[in-house]
């Protein structure tokens, strides 16, 4: 009895130890502590412009940490075949590679020469790290993948420096942020159009193939998500509020990417619904914007650019693309409606005033054309009969079916 009780006392700790070894939470703890440490050091140094070298030291430390993460992750995947541990380590590496800790961003804000030098070195090291991962994992990055990854990572390192220079020269305006948001919105569409970025050959290990697929998706999604984080940081650093209209380009970009990649494999009703709902949301978000974003674009000053007008035109183009790609006829009048609305004005108040003016004019013209006698109504009925005859003929011709010949008896 005592022996059974003794074995029972050790069963629970052994099960816990086995669970710890099976789950291996230490990589997660390591990654959380590294990212938390980076954020805390950045936060402490943010208010002091003279604290540059602690950030440089931090960059050096987590580059060394990245080297350890890459080496350990690739070893566990290729040699030990511990794919879950490898997946987490490579996720952590992609996060650090894309500067989610904002260390390079902080360094550029403190000193442009030092930040540019360290950022340039980090950009070169980023490609060394990607080349190692590509070599060992057999991802086989295509030319399109090289171009897109280079562009995304370069934007991550260069965008803070560009905003800093514009601030130093007192040239940073709300339009620069809005243009950057359109660049962020274009990133998902560019990623969808330039696919495939990778052409890995199937291996003899299905689990390894799943790991490679997971890594390729990370390398597409994480840089775009990091750009969103950098945009949020740019608004915070320059003390610029984020307005709702800033998110409209991202919504349209994600929708366009989805339509481009999935429009042929999804039922047409779903494609139309997603397009119209996303376009409507983007237009609604762009209904309110700062007055500084209304800019005349013609010499007379009668035609204005505005976020609302731009989103209406882009939404119309997206609807026209769905009509052209899938033959969704409902999207054609929707595209014409968005374009017509964009032509009415650049603000909601302008559009509303011009719609009211059109309605009043239509009522006035309709009142003069309405018959005021029995003979007048008769003439109108005769004209309408010809019109409906033509519409009926067109409908019949559009729906005609091939003639079925009689079968021989």
Image: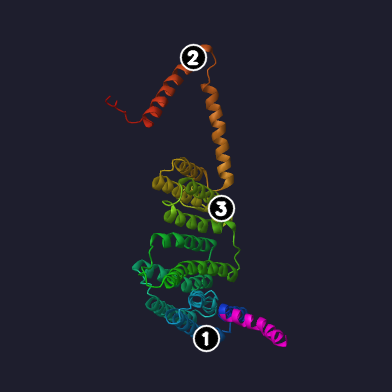
User: Which quadrant of the view contains residue 140?
Assistant: bottom left
Single out the mark in the foreground, 1 or 2.
Answer: 1
**Quarter of the figure that contains the N terminus:** bottom right
> In the rendering, at what x and y percent does residue 294 appear?
53, 53
Q: Quadrant of the C terminus?
A: top left
- Residue 98, label in figure: none
- Front residue of this view, candidates 112 and 286: 286
Which portion, as a residue range, is magenta? 1-21
Check if residue 333 falls in the magenta segment: no
State whether residue 327 appears in this view.
yes
Quadrant in the picture for residue 383: top left
- Answer few, some or many: residues within 10 Å of disc 2's Cα (few below 14, many 20 plus, some between 14 and 19): few
Q: Residue furthest left?
A: 408
Dot 2 corresponds to which residue?
378
Residue 61 is marked as 1
Residue in view at x 47 percent, y 62 percent: 183
Residue 117: horizontal and vertical position, in percent?
45, 82
């Amino acid at each position: 009895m005592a022996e059974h009780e003794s074995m029972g006392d050790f069963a629970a700790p052994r099960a816990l130890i086995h669970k710890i070894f099976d789950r291996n939470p230490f990589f997660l703890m390591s990654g959380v502590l590294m990212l938390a440490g980076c954020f805390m050091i950045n936060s402490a140094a943010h208010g002091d412009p003279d604290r540059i070298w602690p950030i440089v030291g931090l960059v050096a430390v987590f580059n060394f940490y990245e080297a350890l993460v890459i080496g350990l992750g690739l070893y566990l995947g290729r040699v030990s075949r511990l794919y879950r541990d490898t997946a987490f380590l490579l996720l952590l590496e992609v996060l650090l590679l894309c500067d989610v800790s904002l260390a390079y961003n902080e360094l550029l804000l403190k000193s442009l020469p030092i930040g540019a030098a360290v950022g340039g070195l980090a950009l070169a090291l980023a490609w060394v790290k990607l080349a190692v991962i590509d070599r060992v994992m057999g991802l086989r990055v295509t030319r399109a993948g090289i171009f897109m990854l280079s562009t995304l990572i370069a934007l991550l390192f260069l965008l803070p420096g560009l905003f800093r220079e514009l601030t130093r020269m007192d040239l940073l305006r709300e339009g620069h942020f809005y243009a950057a948001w359109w660049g962020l919105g274009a990133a998902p569409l560019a990623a969808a159009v330039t696919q495939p970025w990778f052409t890995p050959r199937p291996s003899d290990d299905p689990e390894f193939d799943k790991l490679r697929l997971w890594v390729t998706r990370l390398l597409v999604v994480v840089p775009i998500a990091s750009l969103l984080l950098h945009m949020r940081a740019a608004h915070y650093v320059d003390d610029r509020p984020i307005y709702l209209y800033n998110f409209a380009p991202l919504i349209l970009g994600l929708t366009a990417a989805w339509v481009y990649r999935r429009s042929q494999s999804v039922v047409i009703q779903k494609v139309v619904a997603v397009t119209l709902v996303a376009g409507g949301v983007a237009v609604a978000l762009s209904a309110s914007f700062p007055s500084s974003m209304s800019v005349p674009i013609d010499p007379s000053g009668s035609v204005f650019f505005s976020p609302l007008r731009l989103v209406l035109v882009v939404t119309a183009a997206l609807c026209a693309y769905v009509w052209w790609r899938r033959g969704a006829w409902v999207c054609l009048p929707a595209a014409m409606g968005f374009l017509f609305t964009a032509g009415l004005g650049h603000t909601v108040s302008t559009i509303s005033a011009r719609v009211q003016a059109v309605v009043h004019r239509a009522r006035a013209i309709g009142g003069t054309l309405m018959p005021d006698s029995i003979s007048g109504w008769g003439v109108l009925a005769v004209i309408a009969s010809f019109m409906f005859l033509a519409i009926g003929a067109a409908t019949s011709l559009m729906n005609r079916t091939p003639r079925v010949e009689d079968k021989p008896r």
